[in-house]
Image (spheres, rainbow, N blue to C red):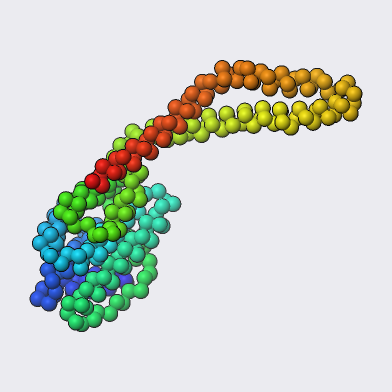
Amino acid sequence: MNIRIIKQQVYEISQMKEELSESLIAVSRFFFVSLSYLQGERVAESYREAFEETCKILQKEEAFYRVAPAWDALLAAVFYYRQAMVCHWWQRERNGLHFSLSLLDCYELLLGLSAEETGEEMVCEVRGGELFEELFLSSRPVTLSKKEVWKEFLRMYRHLREKELLAAESHFEYALMRNKRSLFMTRFPWMKTVSNWSTALSITLGTFLLIALVRIAYNLCVEFPILRLMSLERAGKVYDRKMVEVLLQCRSFMDNGIQVFGSRVLFFCSAFLIVVGIEYMIEKWNDRMCR
């Protein structure tokens, strides 16, 4: 199995204390710990302690930039796996794919760094495969909530920024920012309710208003000219009444439309502005989180 091969090779790297740098060994150990954590073999408190201990070691290393890509890819893989466990069913395949790519990237980087420092090349025995499905099937059933997942990773992200342990082009940071709307709605669940109701209200009222406008435009621009031509052909004896009705409808809409549809227009604009305002708040909150 691919996961078993990966764990075995990374474990071998983590045991080369005399041949490898401390930072590479620390990342390799945390890789092994992360897989155990995702498989349900380690509790969140223990994983958090391992994360903070690894950060202390990396912070002391002047050559952190060498292991930064592998460290960043590992954190991104853990995030995508946890996100796949709590996301909607149509988002699970995408998150699973991101996890497989990130984990494989970290694995290959660790093998490459190990080969550079020891001079002995380690064969990469994993060429892809369904890493997400394989890890999921070998994991213990764990109940998670979106709030717990986001709280954990937001804490990790802020700790990394504080200790300046984010990679230059961090895939972990990019993963969080790409899911910033989900993060905001999980952090403020009442905002999600307001946004959903406002979106539904604006779509419903907007549809009704559009239908009304299209109907009036059709009467004025299509039906009335046709009736006028037909009336001219029949010397105005058959379609005069219908033409007067169409004109009266259009005239009534011009004169009284604002009064009749005023409340609908007001509710539509209010609901739409609420949705826009929430999206603006998401952007501002995201900018503040990144500082």
Tell me what residue is drawn at x 10 percent, y 62 percent. Answer: 60
Which residue is more in the foreground, 268 or 77?
Answer: 268
**Residue 251 shows up from this direction:** yes
Tell me what residue is drawn at x 26 percent, y 70 percent. Answer: 109
Residue 259 position (above or below residue 43): above
Apparent side of residue 132 relative to residue 240 in the rendered image (left or right): left
Which residue is more in the foreground, 224 or 130?
Answer: 224
Picture coordinates of residue 49, whole percent (x, y): 13, 55
Picture coordinates of residue 29, whole percent (x, y): 17, 66
Which residue is more in the foreground, 48 or 248?
Answer: 248
Quadrant where the N terminus is found in the figure: bottom left
Apparent side of residue 46 relative to residue 178 in the rendered image (left or right): left
Which residue is more in the foreground, 162 or 90?
Answer: 162
Tell me what residue is drawn at x 25 percent, y 75 percent. Answer: 112
The image quadrant of residue 195 is top left
Tell me what residue is drawn at x 36 percent, y 37 percent. Answer: 280
Picture coordinates of residue 153, whole percent (x, y): 24, 50
Picture coordinates of residue 140, whole percent (x, y): 27, 57
Apparent side of residue 261 relative to residue 249 in the rendered image (left or right): left
Numbered marks: total = 0
The image quadrant of residue 73 is bottom left
